[in-house]
Structures are given as C-alpha cells and as structure tokens.
Image (cartoon, rainbow, N blue to C red):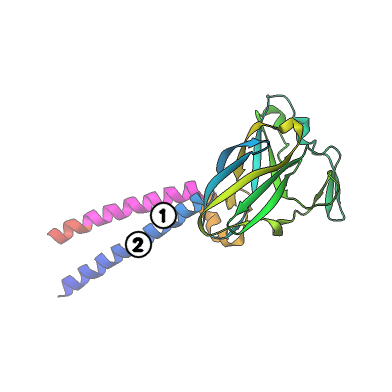
Amino acid sequence: MVKYKFEFVKTTGLVLHWLVLLTLLTIQLLGIVSSIGTSTPFLLGKGGSAEVTVFRLYPTPLHFSLEFNKKKGSIRSELGSGKYTNPKNGAIRFDDPSETIKILAASELGTQIYEMFPSGYLLGEKDDSIAKRTFYPFVEDNDPAAYPWPPANELRPVLPVGFSILKFSVTDTGDVFKNENVIINIAPPIEPKTVHTHDYMWLSWATILWPFNLVALGVYGWYLIWKTRKMAKELQN
C-alpha cells in the first residue's frame, strides 16, 4: 500500500510539472502573438480601402502607419522634413509639413479620421528603400502645419477582444500621392519599446525575452520527457 501511495504522489507531481510547462508555453505563445503586427496593401486615392482581420486579447487602441516606396539615397520631401517648433499650446508646428493624407479607420467599437505625422521614422531613412510614417487621430485646428502634441490618443478607435474586422478608407490625400500603392501596418499591442495598453504589461516579458524563455522551456520539456520515460519504466517493473 505504501508503495502505491508513493507512486501516486510521484505521478501526480509529474503531471503538475507538465501542466506548469503547458501553462508557460501558452503564455509565451500569447506574448509572441501579441507582438506580431498585421500588414496589407493599400491604395491612396479615391475609393482606396482595405479590410483587415485582427485578434486582440484585450481591448486595444488602434495604432497604424504607412510604408512608402522610394529609391535608396533619396528623400521624399512630400512626406515632410521632420523639422519642427517645440510643442507650444498643445501642438507641434512643422517647418515643412507633409502633403495631406487622411484615413478613416473603423472598428466595431469606434470610427476616427487619422492624419499622417511628418516625422517619427526619419533616422537613417535616406539609405532605406521605404519611408515610414505613423498616423495620429485628426483634430481640426485650421492649421495644416500644426499637430496636437501629445496626440489625441483618447480618440483612437478600440479593437475589441477576440477577432474583429478593421476597415480603412481614404478621405483626403495630396495630388502627389493619388493612386500610389502603399502598405498599411497595424501595430501589435506589444512593440519593442511600447505597450499600447497596460493590460498587456504582464505579457511583455514573454515578448522581450522570448529567445531565452524558449531555451529554458525547451530544457524544462526535455527534462520532463526524460522523467516521464524513467517513471514509465519503473512502473512496468
């Protein structure tokens, strides 16, 4: 009887270890999924639109950017110079703002017009084959060179929990961009330097340290396989 009780305790302990491993693997998977963005082609011009299916663990405000093609060694001046006056009266005023691009973004929980921000990815851009510009909620101020700062993040549509369809459509664009093919990038909830809502803070470690985590979990899994095989042989004897 004592022998069987001992074997039961050992077996139960091993099962608990497997449950712990599966739990940690699930958390790691959720962290990786929450750090992968979504991209889709997008046409700038009248009638330009796109639909994207996204998944979120928690309600998350919408952040997105556009990628523009360009020749290496060149600068697309129509995207803005990035030179600005320090924030004053709640706004940044650019010396050479970008041409207008406004996009209507809609989720199940809200709709908002976004405008292109002239700066944000300029460092080293000249030597790249793409130019990136982020978009912020549009606030009417009758000054095309001024942009609210900090951005009006409270106006961002929220992506609900689970799968949802996100729709984009062009509302206004400068002539230089009309009928240009670009890539729209929907930012993931967890980025290398940003977590877009505090609900994801507990998963950020799984994203930042994922290579080390996977190595540790792999070693843990190998140990449990070895332990399980050993116990199976003991129970057969």
Q: Which mark is residue 183?
A: none
* Badge 1 density bin: few <14, some 14–19, many ≥20, Cα 10 Å: some
Q: Which residue is mark 2?
A: 19
Query: Is residue 37 in view from this perspective?
Result: no
The structure residue drawn at horizontal position 57% and vertical position 50%, both measured from the top left corner, is: 166
Which numbered disc, 1 or 2, marks the residue that appears first in the sequence? Answer: 2
Residue 139: give x, y in percent of width and height: 78, 53
Look at label 2 and name its amino acid.
Leu
Query: What residue is shown at x 57% (from left), y 62% (from top)?
Result: 199
The kind of secondary structure element at disc 1 is helix
For residue 102, which quarter of the picture?
top right
Residue 170 appears in the rendering: yes
- Give the residue pinned by disc 1: 25
Q: Gap between marks 1 and 2, in whole Å?
A: 10 Å
User: Which residue is located at x 71 percent, y 48 percent?
Assistant: 114
* Residue 222 or residue 95, whichever sits in front: 95
- What's the magenta region? 209-230
